[in-house]
Image: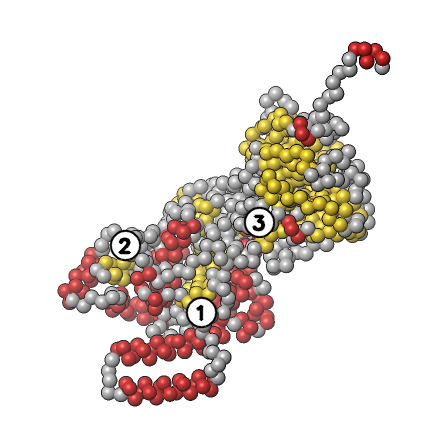
Amino acid sequence: MTLSRRGFLNVAAIGAAGTFAADMTRFDMLRHSAWADEAKKQGKRVILLWLAGGASQLETFDPKPGRPTGGPYRAIPTSATGVHISELLPKMAARIQQTTAIVRSLNTKNADHGGGATIMETGRIKDPGIEYPDLGAVCAKELGRLDSAVPDYVSMYTSTEGRRKGGSGFLGSRYAPMFLSESMQPENIRRLESISDLDHQDRLALRELLAKKFTQNRNSDSLGSHTQAYQRVRGLMASEKLFDIEQEPAEMRAKYGPTQFGQQCLIARRLVEAGVPFVKVARAWWDSHGENFETHRELCADLDHSMSALLDDLKDRGLLEHTLVLTFGEFGRTPGINASLGRDHFAAAWSATLSGCGVRGGACFGKTDEDGHKVADGEVGAGDLFATILSALGIDPLKEYHVGARPVPLSDFGSKPIKDVLI
Amino acid sequence: MASDPTKLNKTKDIGIPSIAMCVARIPNSGRLIFGSSDFKLHEIDVFAEKPQSTAFGGEGHQSYVTGVVLPTPNVAVSSSYDGQLIWWDVEKREPTRKVKAHELWMRRLVISPDGKTIASVADDMQCKLWNAETGEMLRQFSDHKAMTPHDFPSMLHAVAFSADGKFIATGDKVGHVAIWEATSGSKVGTVEAPGLYTWDPKQRRHSIGGIRALAFSPDNKLLAVGGIGQIGNIDHLDAPARVEIFDWQKGERKHELNNDKFKALVEDLAFDPASQWLLSSGGAGDGFVTFVSPETGKVIHQDKLPMHVHQLALNEASDTLFAVGHHKIVVCEFKATDPPPAAPAEAAKS
């Protein structure tokens, strides 16, 4: 791994000062604090629609109609001139120009579920020597507020196949996701039935009184941290209603539709509206080794409706320009159609989308060959996609964290943002 | 009997560049018209020394060709995911008429035994009847919900005429079958085969399967329904090929046949005109053919085929099958062995 000159100087300076700490990232934050603060001030947020199992690019954003690999579905024009997507996504087709950029030239080189997911969660290949944080944790750190009363990172993955919690790696548990797997409501944050609301309030008042007396004439970071942690827990408890879509008017719930994914997209909107910087909604399971076309007929209908409703709702609320909505999974699917009319794992030429914040709607970057076997133009990797995501959010992808003496850039070494899809 | 399934013997195995989705046979010949994943109709004479397929020309379909029937030996009608019905001159291999038939993907096309009426089904969940000669739509009907109970789009894959042409059966993704009187479009019965639909609410949260094939018995009393059984891992076609046989007028299920040899999807069904067997065929990675007794439900004979079969045609004697599917066309004979020649003395007596 290359050590950048800037990274080296930082490490040298830190080493000379003899001020190593467990979480070295705070040193680099000083240098970038102006940028990061600006991003936070603007309230940038991310919703990742994780297409778990690997959606087919040919049945979504890179159709090849009429080719032997193309399958039976037509390509339809979108609102962006010259850009066609699968007819399975008619609602998204009407929204491309206004909201969404397509990247058609991902080559992420790993078509194994676990390995592919690691790459697409962290933007780089696994390194046995270091545990990288996933995109959610990075965004939680970069966009979250220390004084936030809501979670920084919420991850929903209710299906069991391929379920991955994601993780904050070397950033530590502070940036780990609030993970919802069994229910759309977080567990263990509800006030105990045995404690009345009045008792709960009284306890708060007593705690504050005692804390105030205790901290008088004491000046300690750990005391402040303790108070902050307590406030955060109380905030999380109070955030329970954010996960309750019954709080929404029936008309709004109807817009998102009855599917679980649609409902989770509505929760995601409620969360980002309340200030949660990163929400991941996993929609499993696209792993269509058999009956690819029937599977995508179902799942694309769900994606098309839910994603369109989400983008419309964010736009109507003035949130879309500050919220980046992403779609990708661990990989795409083979252009070749197997004997079960399925498509298998494929990472050499597939697609992702970025919508909203910082994104040039209607942009379509990269090109695959006529049958979709290879990237023909504009090949990018996961690191480039992550650099693009961070840039769209106003976060410097070259910014470095430090793990011990080791500098770790936010997006992988050598990666570059795809400028064509950015405003 | 003229046929003997136990004598099944593959006589032709022909490679083709595309996936053949449907087939019709020109009577008394080895000439097959098949519809394909290359959006085209093709003709091939499988009995030729070196069979070569020839694509039909002209402005054809815009997607996979999913059904083909022959109202006369020189007229073919095809259906496609593009929602169009196209009439073709077989000799010229040119289209003669196009009709926008359905709003969504057409899944199957069948023709009445007298060759006068065509029935089409599509994901708009409609069954439409067409005058095979004029292209006029005669009527349409549906008893199939657009959405599954789990709020996803349903699909209408299967349709069949009864042997006397009086009834039509339609079968959808969730296992609902409706039986209709062909002349009036009145619904005259329903049967349910939910065992052919797998909904995975937890692991993968989508569905697979559905009714893919239907066939009436020669006396019209039985209705066979084909697909795939309950699948544990719905990423794959990983469950026994499944056929259910109903006495549809009584609404009774006579047999529930889970094929213990082949994990596969049943794509096509055909009854022996003499009611000695019910033939099912389909596939997953490979293909299969299974003959069962409609009376007992017992397997008479089954064998592997070298490709996933999407449809098959039988000859006039029902002792030869022509199967089309994944990059292959296969011909299998299952002729009853001729009785041994009579001894000269016996022959003289007679």
Q: Residues within 10 Å of mark 2 (few under 14, many from 20)?
A: few
Residue matched to label 3: B231
Q: Residue at x 47, y 67 (%)?
A: A268
Q: Earlier in the sequence, mark 1 or mark 2?
A: 2
- Point 35% across, 72% down: residue: A145
Tell me which amino acid carries mark 3.
Ile
Which label was assigned to residue A129? 2
Quadrant containing the N terminus of chain B in the rendered view:
top right
Q: Secondary structure at mark 1?
A: helix
| Cα separation between marks 2 and 3 | 41 Å
Q: CA distance from mark 1 to mark 3?
A: 38 Å
**Residue placed under numbered mark 1 in the picture:** A272
For the C terminus of chain B, the image quarter is top right
Q: Amino acid at mark 1?
A: Val
Give the answer, above or below, for where B97 lies relative to A102: above
Q: Position of residue A178 (x, y in %)?
A: 42, 67
